[in-house]
Image (tube, rainbow, N blue to C red):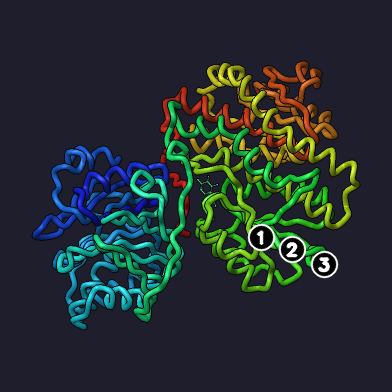
Amino acid sequence: MCGIVGYIGEEQAAPLLLQGLEKLEYRGYDSAGVAVYTGEKLEVAKAKGRLKILSDMLDEGKSLRGTVGIGHTRWATHGAPSDINSHPQVSDSGKFAVVHNGIIENYLTLKTFLMDRGVTFVSETDTEVVAQLLEYYYKKYHCDILEAMIRVIHKVEGSYALGVICQDSPDELYAVRKDSPLIVGLGQGESFIASDVPAILAKTREIYRLNDNEIVRLTRSGVTVFNTDRDEVHKEPVHIDWDVSAAEKGGYEHFMFKEIMEQPKAIRDTISPRIRDGKIVLDDITLTREQVESFRRIVIVACGSAYHVGVVAKYALEQLTRIPVEVDVASEFRYRHPIIDDKALVLIISQSGETADTLAAMREAKRLGARTLSIVNVVGSSIANESDDVLYTWAGPEIAVATTKAYSTQLAVVYLLALYLADLLDTISPEEYESYLDDLQKLPEQIEAVLQNREHIQYFASRNFNAKDIFFIGRNIDYALSLEGSLKLKEISYIHSEAYAAGELKHGTISLVEDGTLVVALASYLPLFDKTMSNVKEVKARGAYVLGLTVEGKTEIEKETDFVFYLPATNTMMQPSLMVVPLQLFAYYVAAMKGCDIDKPRNLAKSVTVE
Ligand code: G6P
């Protein structure tokens, strides 16, 4: 969701900005723009639509001279996608150009304040208010840019990552953030800003992660960070050790497919370092047995697929620890005056660690006195930094908007955590513990086996990619997983689909089943296999065409369904880790056959940093 890149150095800025923005395309956007100081003035180029349109307009950036500039990919919030509403937004006189991620919540009040003082606005964006306000303070107080930035920060409410250049100071670039990610890249004679690492990885691996309201001034000779009192802040550089290829497609047609295929490795990387001598060692968390015993419940908050991990986690955590677990969508939790105190452990799940609702929900839980533990993929992200404890998923960078390997590694961490807590509380026998641990370590090779068999799913997809509605049904943990199967499909293929608890179908939704309706029946939870088969019979009787998914050996499913995909068996709790793979592949192949933009589905963003 929205991308920011900024550059100051000796090289021509525009081509670098466009290359950086290209690396952020995966975040989702609907328009793009750049502003560069050309030697006399700021020049701005913007275009609605794909970055390619802007790039063609500027001959890949070559037609725009200048060595300092800012660039942006916008995902519309205030004002429709259009050339005018795209960023950079400039101030009345054209002195200031600003790119912005986030939302300025009080922009209307500020806009009225400025309009009353004669400022003319051209766009519908909240961002233009920042550009105009900067110029207003800069002129009114005859101050420097740093001072104008500080005044703006004191005035605006909401979230922001801002990149700013000013015609009067062409050898400087400024940036600041609050509740929206922004990093600073450190080079030799050049520096960068970016909303995410891939944008600058080709140029530098040394970065600063900015804290809220730290203002950074970048020049060709270095970077200085200030607080809002103008004091210099000392920052420790962070070294990014990702392999560049981790953020490249590496021969695959889509990032999503590459990331599906990377799951065995990602899970291995996530669990192996945490199992030593037959025991789970979570060095990263500091919870004592007494603390865990004091928790009356666990509350999981997350968004999207991470929320779906939470739904599976409820089954796993309750089964093993016998602590009651609630799962809530972060955007609901944060505003429902949740009943939370220090007897609750709040578990936050997030790939990016920056999702605005999830971050706000975590802050609310902390404010109410809860202990917070996060499961996060991006090291040093806001949620990771602010939670009491963090367990990282070692999935590496995930680029495709539709998550796959992050979901799988989050599940793996949930199993580690559930077993770890159960062991701490003595709610599991040593034999069970050992057997679960064995199963957990086998998952990567079992997933490899499922992936080997992918042509079977590809064939099924080729016969069904024209479906109009698809229903996913299951019971218990299969139901929890069906939520993700359905979401994956609709995210990237735009086919309407719903996930339903198999036993609930007859209370309404079955009225939608008619001749040829595709139903995907998840039946890996063997204690309720027969019950699920009864529900399959109900939809078959109404004409449904059924894909059945179950474990190897359960051949009786063939009598009830039209097409079957078998999965290796593991314990029932971990079965979603295997079962999710054919569901991801099904969504992928259907979307590919429909010619959809798989890695960048319409209207969606990878990291949702606004409410
Ligand atoms: C967006 C992404 C989803 C993701 C959700 C939560 O909607 O498209 O794939 O599950 O945000 O993101 P997070 O980074 O908090 O896991």
Q: Amino acid at mark 1?
A: Leu
Q: Position of residue 368 (x, y in %)?
A: 66, 73
Of 164 and 207, which appears nearest the observer?
207
Q: Amino acid at mark 2?
A: Leu
Viewed as shown, does residue 384 lie left or right of 370?
left
Q: Which residue is mark 3?
A: 290
Q: Which residue is mark 2?
A: 287
Of 240 and 456, which appears nearest the observer?
240
Report crowding for label 1: few under 14, some 14 to 19, many 20 or more residues within 10 A (C-alpha): many
Report crowding for label 2: few under 14, some 14 to 19, many 20 or more residues within 10 A (C-alpha): some
Q: Residue at x 21, y 72 (%)?
A: 135
Q: Position of residue 7 (x, y in %)?
A: 27, 54
Image: 311 above or below 218:
above
Figure quadrant of residue 233: bottom left
Viewed as shown, does residue 135 lie left or right of 418?
left
Q: Which residue is mark 1?
A: 373
Q: Amino acid at mark 3?
A: Glu
Q: CA distance from mark 1 to mark 2?
A: 10 Å
Q: CA distance from mark 2 to mark 3?
A: 8 Å
Query: Which residue appears farthest toward the front when viewing the image?
Result: 188
Asked whether residue 268 is in view, the answer is yes
Tell me if the residue at label 3 has its CB under 8 Å from ligand 1: no
Element on which disc 1 rests: strand
Of 392 and 187, which appears nearest the observer?
187
Q: Position of residue 438 (x, y in %)?
A: 79, 36
Report crowding for label 3: few under 14, some 14 to 19, many 20 or more residues within 10 A (C-alpha): few
Question: Mark 1–mark 2 contact, CB under 8 Å?
Answer: yes
Q: Disc 3 or 1, which lies upstream in sequence? A: 3
Asked whether residue 506 is in view, the answer is no
Q: CA distance from mark 3 to mark 1?
A: 16 Å
Query: Which residue appears farthest toward the left when viewing the image?
Result: 40
